[in-house]
Image: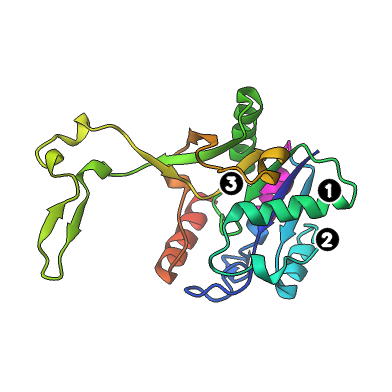
Amino acid sequence: MNVAIIPARSGSKRIPGKNIKQFCDKPMIAYPIETATSSKYIEQVIVSTDSEEIANIALEYDALVPFKRPKELSDNFTPTVPVIAHAVNMLIETGLKIENVCCIYPCTPLLKSRDIDDVYEIFISQEKDFVYPVIPYTHPIQRAMRMSDFGEMEFLFPQNELTRTQDLERTYHDAGQFYWGTVEAWLEQKKMHTDGIGVPIESWKVIDIDEEEDWDRAELLKKALG
């Protein structure tokens, strides 16, 4: 069985109630639930949360919330992998025979089920622990600069100051949307980035929602894309 696990804790600092705040016409967490439900390869959608309010909204959108996430896995510093490992263990204790798990972050309103399915097909063909989407940096990180308190600029890599951007290696970062992994990889708490492979996707499909400005831009994109 393939399951999706959406880790959605309470306590967001920069955007209070971010996971259930109204986004366009529904709570934010409704989007990944509906996307996962529409996937060809996901059979159950589980929400891992410490919040009764999040749990109730998740249930309204037909996700399952069969356990409550413990307090020690619900703070600002807890990484993703232990949260998913806990959820997998809880599901196995109920008798579920799980083969693969797709961790989907709750603030992913632009995510489509076909993206999850496309990456899954690469995942099963490559036989890797994890597979996840990545996007290229918009500007070569080899020409990154730091700024002093007085506005003075300094290259982090001075040897690249005069290098043409097109001559520098393309670099990528995690899209921060979802991760397919084997149940064994999650339970062994392997590193989902370096123990997996990245799949490049279009940059316009990704927006990191950390500030109110990001939220507003994401709503505009969602309305434009439908």
Q: CA distance from mark 2 to mark 3?
A: 21 Å
Residue found at x 72% / y 40%: 183
Q: Residues within 10 Å of mark 3 (few under 14, many from 20)?
A: many
Which type of secondary structure does the marked residue at label 3 adopt? strand
Q: Are marks 2 and 3 in contact (CB under 8 Å)?
A: no
Residue behind mark 2: 66
Q: Mark 1 belongs to which amino acid?
A: Ile
Quarter of the view holding residue 207: bottom left
**Quarter of image, res 108:** bottom right
Image position, residue 131 (x, y; %): 57, 36
Residue type at mark 3: give it.
Phe
What amino acid is labelled 2 in the image? Answer: Pro
User: Across the whole image, how many numbered discs are drawn on residues?
Assistant: 3
Where is residue 120, by image quadrant?
top right
Q: CA distance from mark 1 to mark 2?
A: 12 Å
Q: Is residue 7 within the magenta segment?
A: no
- Is 37 a magenta residue? yes
If you read the primary sequence from the N terminus, does the residue marked by circle 1 or circle 3 appear first?
A: 1
Q: Sequence order check: which comes first, mark 2 or mark 3?
A: 2
Residue in the image at 73% along x and 59% along y: 47
Mark nearer the N terminus (1 vs 2): 2
Q: Which residue is mark 3?
A: 178
- How many other residues sit within 10 Å of disc 2, few (<14), some (14-19) or many (≥20)? some
Q: Position of residue 87 (x, y in %)?
A: 74, 55
- Image disc number at residue 80: none
Q: Residue at x 55, y 36 (%)?
A: 195
Q: Is residue 213 left or right of residue 184?
A: left
**Residue to which mark 1 is pinned:** 92
Comparing 86 with 23, the one in front is 86
